[in-house]
Image (cartoon, rainbow, N blue to C red):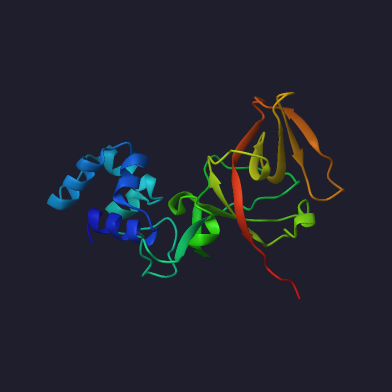
Amino acid sequence: MNFWDVIRDEIKAQGTTQEWVAAKSGISYDTIKGWISKNRLPRLDQAKVIADSLNLSLDAILAGKALHTFVIPVQDYSPNSEAIAIPILDHKVVPGTELDVPGSLKVIGSLPFMRKLLRGALPAEARALEIRGDAMTGLGLFGGDMVVFQPGLVEEDGIYVIQVDMLLLVKRIYFDRIARNIHIMSENERYPDKIEPLDAQAVRLIGRVLAWVHVHQR
């Protein structure tokens, strides 16, 4: 299986398109299409940005080892399939409690998910994270549940994955645009709310939570 075989399979598995990969990688669609049709390999730096756009490990591809940085549990996903595979990040989100965050979050698996539940968000950009802690139990969000979010999607009040200093949290966010503040709120009275300036360097909105998968405890 050569480089373009892997890329074609991954585009199909993630339910995306060559056009999307072109936009994500910054390489024109016509260029990528031409490379694929002629089975011509790009330069190493170009191959890396293409692989990165699909969360693939270029080193693993070139070494002939594991091709994916995450495992697709069902291999016959297609762009028209109702089911998609969302990459799961290896570091658990801890709502309301401290958690050291590594410089990069590795993908360790994939979450089978219904496309329609993403409410129009791009399937190839969705990510999943496992929850620990009890700061959002008022929403029915408990430890062991999975949140599905889209990095970079910041639009209106809602539930977000945020980074505060070196902590990843899941919180309800309210934007006070008049006072230019954001209200960071838990759904558990044990955790106090916080107010931060809208442009605070210590607070970063990672992406809006689109849905979550609840694990029922007997």
Q: Residue at x 42, y 70 (%)?
A: 74
Q: Residue furthest right?
A: 190
Q: Is 106 or 164 nearer to us in this picture?
A: 164
Q: How many marks?
A: 0
Asked where in the image residue 161 lies, by quadrant, the reply is top right
Residue 155: image x %, image y %? 59, 38
Residue 83: image x %, image y %? 46, 66
Q: Residue at x 22, y 57 (%)?
A: 2
Q: Residue at x 40, y 58 (%)?
A: 14
Residue 7: image x %, image y %? 29, 54
Residue 164 visible at all = yes
Q: Can you say whether 126 is above or below 203 in the image?
A: below
Q: Quadrant of the C terminus?
A: bottom right
Asked where in the image residue 130 lies, by quadrant, the reply is bottom right
Q: Is 93 or 172 nearer to us in this picture?
A: 172
Determine whether, in the image, residue 146 is placed left or right of residue 36.
right
Q: Residue at x 79, y 50 (%)?
A: 187
Q: Is 154 or 196 nearer to us in this picture?
A: 154
Q: Quadrant of the N terminus?
A: bottom left
Residue 99 visible at all = no
Residue 210: image x %, image y %? 59, 52
Q: Can you say whether 144 is above or below 95 in the image?
A: below
Determine whether, in the image, residue 59 is placed left or right of residue 5.
right
